[in-house]
């Protein structure tokens, strides 16, 4: 066997499972999953497979193909969710803090309550980032009830999020300088302080299939995830979000994501890219 053939053989061995996985999720789950995306994530799939008590990534894929919902949820969460670091896309947080938060404070001044939903929360970095931001305004929001509902279909990700412990390389000096009062150092990790952790409820929920949360939210943050789904499912997701928002509530998508062809029930908020306000 030549050296080139030898180097290619591991890829060839995984070609079938990767192709089957992509085809299954695209047909049965209305996803936009390529064979290459599966290839690139085999090491992550293997880790999750072992945590689920399976032999490896191929075993995980085969269980998913047979309809095992734990395996399906694990693959969806790994391959069809954004996995941001803390305050990733800093411009969104700046716009939230400087433009949207004052609007929410003014809009909700009578009930003194702000509720946020982060669907597809993965390990919780987005939810904790928002909680740290709100915590930095504790003086202004001292009498307010603040709640972030963070949901995902991967119990392993939710368990990690519940630990409230993160590697220090996920939180840089600038973040710590602005929001560090909500963090404490513990060896090579940052721990989320209890007063910040208590702002968040982590829960199993599928944002396009499960029963909608009973709470009506002021804000839904769903960044850089629409692209993973077909237009039909995108439309269903946005309709679910529309039902889950308060009148005149806000939906935050990722840069480059648009509601233009998906809904006529939102308008762009404050000329800010990715920020939308429900019309009623």
Image (tube, grey):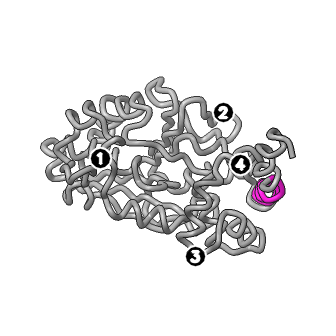
Give the residue pinned by disc 3. Answer: 53
Contact between labelled residues 3 and 4, with CB atoms less than 8 Å apart: no
Q: How many marks?
A: 4
Q: Which residue is disc 2 drawn over?
A: 260
Q: Position of residue 214 (x, y in %)?
A: 46, 67
The mark nearer the N terminus, 1 or 2, is 1
Q: Earlier in the sequence, mark 3 or mark 1?
A: 3
Q: Is 224 placed above or below 147 here?
A: above
Q: Residues within 10 Å of mark 2 (few under 14, many from 20)?
A: few
For the residue carrying disc 3, how many other residues have a C-alpha within 10 Å: few (<14), some (14-19), or many (20+)? few
Q: CA distance from mark 4 to mark 2?
A: 32 Å
Nearest to viewer (mark 2 / mark 3): 3
Q: Which residues are magenta?
A: 15-25
> Is residue 96 on the magenta stretch?
no
**What residue sits right under mark 4 in the picture?**
39
Based on the displayed image, in which of its 4 quarters is residue 139 positioned? top left
Left or right: where 126 falls relative to 267:
left
Quick check: marks 2 and 3 in contact, CB under 8 Å? no
Please tell me which of labels 4 and 1 falls first in the chain. Answer: 4
Residue at position x 22%, y 34% in the image = 178
Residue 120 sits above or below residue 50 on the image: above
Q: Position of residue 171 (x, y in %)?
A: 31, 40
Front label number (4 vs 2):
4
Any mark on residue 108, and which?
1
- Camera-near label (4 vs 1) is 4
């Amino acid at each position: 066997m030549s050296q080139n053939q030898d180097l290619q053989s591991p890829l060839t061995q995984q070609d079938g499972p990767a192709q089957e996985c992509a085809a299954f999720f695209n047909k049965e789950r209305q996803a936009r999953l390529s064979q290459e995306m599966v290839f690139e994530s085999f090491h992550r799939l293997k880790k999750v497979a072992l945590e689920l008590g399976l032999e490896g990534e191929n075993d995980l894929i085969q269980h998913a193909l047979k309809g095992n919902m734990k395996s399906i949820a694990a693959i969806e969460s790994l391959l069809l969710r954004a996995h941001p670091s803390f305050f990733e896309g800093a411009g969104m947080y700046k716009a939230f803090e400087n433009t949207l938060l004052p609007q929410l404070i003014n809009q909700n001044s009578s009930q003194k309550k702000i509720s946020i939903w982060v669907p597809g929360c993965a390990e919780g970095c987005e939810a904790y980032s928002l909680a740290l931001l709100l915590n930095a305004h504790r003086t202004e929001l001292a009498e307010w009830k603040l709640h972030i509902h963070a949901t995902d279909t991967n119990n392993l990700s939710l368990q990690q999020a519940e630990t409230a412990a993160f590697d220090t390389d996920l939180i840089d000096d600038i973040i710590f300088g602005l929001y560090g009062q909500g963090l404490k150092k513990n060896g090579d990790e940052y721990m989320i302080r209890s007063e910040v952790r208590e702002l968040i409820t982590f829960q199993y929920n599928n944002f396009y299939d499960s029963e909608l949360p009973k709470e009506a939210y002021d804000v839904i943050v769903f960044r850089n995830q629409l692209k993973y789904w077909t237009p039909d499912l995108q439309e269903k997701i946005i309709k679910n979000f529309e039902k889950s928002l308060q009148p005149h509530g806000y939906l935050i998508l990722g840069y480059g994501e648009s509601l233009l062809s998906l809904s006529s029930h939102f308008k762009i908020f404050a000329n800010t890219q990715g920020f939308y306000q429900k019309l009623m």
